[in-house]
Amino acid sequence: MRQVHICEVGPRDGLQNARHRMTTEAKKRWVSALAAAGVEEIEVGSFVPPKLIPAMADTEEIVRHALGIAGLRVVALAPNVKGFERALQAGAHKVTFPVSASRRHSEANVRMSPEQMVAQVKTCVEMRGASGPQIEAGIATAFGCTLQGEVPEDDVVRLAAQLAEAGVDCIALADTVGYANPAQIRRLFRRVRAEVGDKLEAAHLHNTRGLGLANALAAFDEGVRHFDASLGGLGGCPFAPGASGNVVTEDLVFMFEAMGIPTGIDLDRLIEARRILGEALPEEPLYGHLAAAGLPKGFCAAA
Ligand code: COA
Ligand code: ZN
């Protein structure tokens, strides 16, 4: 019944970049509320060194909690083989790796070159057994980089080909710092799809410059049916003061539902999950238009 699939990444991307810490109990309540709203997939945390990102130190426990929710697909980020081993141990359904197209972002983010990251991902593909998790590679800074500036499209296409060759199940293109515009989205999704076909699955968009929804629609028009988003646009960007986080989940759901494209997500319940998020992090800015303006009179969700 769902024609687009939305993965809520707030508990990972949002909380990692938030100024305030959320307690483990509040994270569990938030994840449960998201699932109750019909969110089918949640990136609940990342298996990174706890010393490096203390906000993700309880990821094992959040994965365990999320695995107890019937029907929910539990995703975790891993930056290397060690993180993948922790994800395997915890039983995540899907593991996503950040593989930067920008060499400088790659060095800054994971202290490895893009080629070294591809090798890490390949090792993980080989390690997982028949019942292992799905493996996704998110090509970070695919549309530009705050450190390097322009990221050549050829670099992104080549990296996607290397990741497909390494055996990943799916690839996402990520606008990590919110540089993308709709024309660029159309061009790059088309080029990468021509290279790796259906392995190209998701769009991970940030709303840093207000183009999140426009970019999502451009990606949809290019055949993309999987989107990452964060409730309340939670998060920010360490390289861009004042920046909001990912494309706002509730606004994205509203756009698709209003267009008659079912997401499987109940907007009233999603706003309830936003309330729970706001209570857990009262000082953290939340973004989004739907929560401010409410649903239009007589609004009908997509059938
Ligand atoms: N989980 C837990 N501990 C880990 C780990 C993981 N995934 N990876 C490495 N470690 C530990 C090592 O065991 C080592 O511990 P020790 O000092 O007790 O021996 C220590 O961390 C350093 O390991 P090393 O392999 O040298 O890592 P590094 O310091 O070069 O950092 C990454 C590399 C990839 C682990 C780190 O840069 C990282 O986590 N980056 C991800 C950032 C991120 O999440 N960005 C958002 C996504 S866009
Ligand atoms: Zn992101």
Image (cartoon, rainbow, N blue to C red):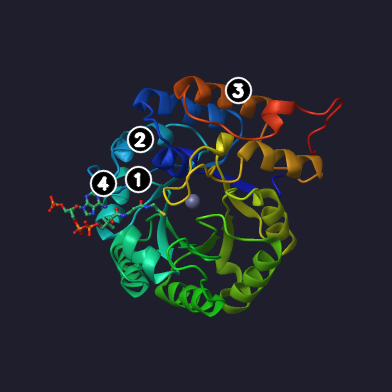
Q: Secondary structure at mark 2?
A: helix
Q: CA gap, disc 3 to disc 4?
A: 32 Å
Residue position marked by numbered label 4 in the rendering: 52
Give the mark nearest the N terminus, 3 or 4. 4
Mark 3 vs mark 4: in front:
4
The image quadrant where one finds the C terminus is top right
Give the mark nearest the N terminus, 4 or 2. 4
Q: Secondary structure at mark 1?
A: loop
Mark 1 vs mark 4: in front:
4
Q: Are marks 4 and 2 in contact (CB under 8 Å)?
A: no
| Numbered badge on residue 26 | none
Give the mark nearest the N terminus, 3 or 1. 1
Q: Are marks 3 and 4 in contact (CB under 8 Å)?
A: no
Mark 3 vs mark 1: in front:
3
Query: Label 4 sits on what residue type?
Result: Leu
Residue position marked by numbered label 3 in the rendering: 272
Query: Label 3 sits on what residue type?
Result: Glu
Give the mark nearest the N terminus, 2 or 3. 2
Q: CA gap, disc 4 to disc 2?
A: 22 Å
Residue position marked by numbered label 1 in the rendering: 91
Q: Is mark 4 within 8 Å of ligand 1?
A: yes
Q: Are marks 1 and 2 in contact (CB under 8 Å)?
A: yes
Residue at image location 30% in from the left, 35% down from the top: 58
Q: Are marks 3 and 1 in contact (CB under 8 Å)?
A: no
Residue position marked by numbered label 2 in the rendering: 64
Query: Label 1 sits on what residue type?
Result: Gly
**Residue situated in front as seen by the camera: 68 or 56:** 56
In the rendered image, residue 175, in percent from the top left (x then y), is placed at 54, 58
**Residue situated in front as seen by the camera: 276 or 246:** 246
